Image (tube, rainbow, N blue to C red):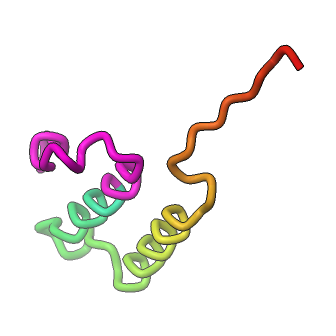
Amino acid sequence: MKENKLDSVLVNHIKGQERMELIRGLADLAKQCLDMCGRNRPSTKEIADELGRLRKLSLHPWHGRIYTFDATT
């Protein structure tokens, strides 16, 4: 956990997916929840807020899409 080797833990079919930002957010939240010192762990409200933020991010219509614009027009 200290080395932040999320990519080595994930199975190959998950890597490179457009939802990697969501997966990284969830992994970071889980890492915070596992802190040995209880004072450093997020509160239930903070966890709910972060999960809500990640959910909104995943539902956003532009999330994971690549848009290109033609500069010549």
- What secondary structure is the magenta-colored segment mainly? loop
Q: Residue furthest bottom?
A: 44
Residue 59: quadrant of the picture: bottom right
Residue 31, image x and y in percent?
Answer: 21, 61
The answer to whether residue 9 is left or right of residue 70 is: left
Image location (x, y in percent) of residue 35: 17, 65
Q: Position of residue 21 (x, y in %)?
A: 40, 50
From the viewer's perspective, is 42 left or right of 73?
A: left
Q: Is residue 32 magenta?
A: no
* Residue 35, above or below 66: below
Identify the residue at horizontal 62%, vertical 59% (top origin).
61
Residue 9 at x, y percent in the picture? 10, 48
Residue at screen point 65% across, 36% down: 67
Residue furthest top in the image: 72
Q: Is residue 25 above or below residue 20?
A: below
Q: Is residue 16 above or below residue 28?
A: above
What span is colored magenta in the figure?
1-24
Name above or below for residue 1 compared with residue 59.
above
Q: Nearer the viewer, residue 35 or 51?
A: 51
Residue 8 in magenta stretch: yes
Front one among 8 and 30? 8
Residue depicted at x 85% and y 14%: 72
Residue at figure coordinates x 42%, y 77% from the top left: 46
